[in-house]
Amino acid sequence: MSVRGTGSVFEAPLCTALTDQSFRSTLSDAEFDGLWACASDHDLDLLLAALLWRTPDLPDETREEASRRLGAAKLVEQLRHTELLRLLRALAPADVLLLKGAALAHTIYPEPHLRPRLDVDLFVRSEQVGEVHGRLVDCGYTREPAAALADFERSYTRVADSGFHHCVDLHWGVANLAPFARALPFDSAWQASIPVEALGPTARTLGHADALFLACLHRVAHHHDSLSLLWLWDIHLLAARLTDRDWAALVRNAQDTDLRAVTIRGLELSREKFATRIPTDVFDRLEPSGRPEPTARFLRRLRLAEIAMTELEAMGSWRARLAFLLTNLFPPRAHMQTAYPGCPAFLLPLAYLHRIVRGAPKWLRRPVS
């Protein structure tokens, strides 16, 4: 995710407005445009729209823009909600946890349409992947070709009669990268899980402490320490709900998994941007123990090649490392036929070569925030 608004003159007033839930109505048209652009860059435009809609004495065009965005988001949410209810009913025999956006939308946001998201993230035990895969297929979902370095996730899509695309990511690790994937084992997450009442009697998601832990590691493991304000706002909202017992559980998770630096980074950024209230002793207890934390290197925004080397180091055998390299260099034929539609079978070797040559620069380029 490229966050173009990062560092703009509108970021600080946007953060202040959302934190205080109040808005100064004396901005010029150009300043309103800049604020909208910054909020959109960070996927916070719906939260801004809700705040502007509640603010009296704003220009008519500003209220109309806020109303338009909120109305469109509510329509999309209705489509998603109906599909998610159908999906959760179909998956009910299995233990399934909702993760990230879909879960947070229904647990910490005032209204679910205010939390933008592109897909539904489901977390299951590794031994239940086959069962859940079958139920997703029965619901009309098609499995997508695996992405590079995706060892703990499968992606599925379904196009509804309305033409709306529904996307599901099925996880049996909370992140794709090995150093993060097992940071939150399913059984412990399930034991601490909470119901999502708006989605029916079987819907469950992570407890707030686990959700905050995942929010801190997700922005680093999947998004190169992105400065997206949306993910920091998630952290801010979750932190406000933690009890002393929850904070102790968060610290214990970070200590046990050597994810102190990554957890500290998320909490510090949230406090910097949104004045998030965090108990002082939490940072003291999260101070590094002195032994190396392999995940801390991801705070440097690693190149894809460096991430691959980290993955290889985390693997326990040369057989696993060789399989990892072969899978990423020479993915299955089905993947190649999707990536190169219409390519005759006898030309597939050239397609593999083209893929390697074309993809090489991406592996060597350092990501931007």
Image: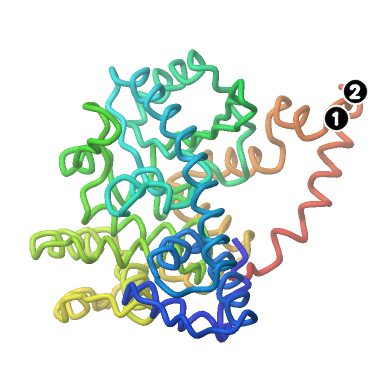
Distance of label 2 from label 1 (alpha carbons): 7 Å
**Callout 2, which amino acid?**
Pro
**Callout 1, which amino acid?**
Leu
Residue sitting nearer the eye, 184 or 162: 162
The residue to which callout 2 is attached is: 344
Classed neighbour count for the residue bearing mark 2: other residues with Cα under 10 Å, few (<14), some (14–19), many (≥20): few
Instruction: Give the number of marks.
Output: 2
Which SS class for mark 1?
helix
Q: Which mark is residue 348?
A: 1
Q: Is residue 340 visible?
A: yes
**Rendered location of residue 227, percent (x, y):** 50, 71
**Residue 141 occupies which quadrant of the picture?**
top right
Q: Are marks 2 and 1 in contact (CB under 8 Å)?
A: yes
Q: Please tell me whether residue 52 is drawn above or below residue 154 in the rendered image.
A: below
The residue positioned 37% from the left and 17% from the top of the image is: 90
Horizontal placement of 209 versus 65: left or right? Answer: left
The N terminus, quarter of image: bottom right
Q: Is residue 152 visible?
A: no
The residue positioned 39% from the left and 36% from the top of the image is: 122
The residue positioned 63% from the left and 70% from the top of the image is: 368
Horizontal placement of 222 versus 1: left or right? Answer: left
**Rendered location of residue 134, percent (x, y):** 46, 16
Q: Which mark is residue 80?
A: none
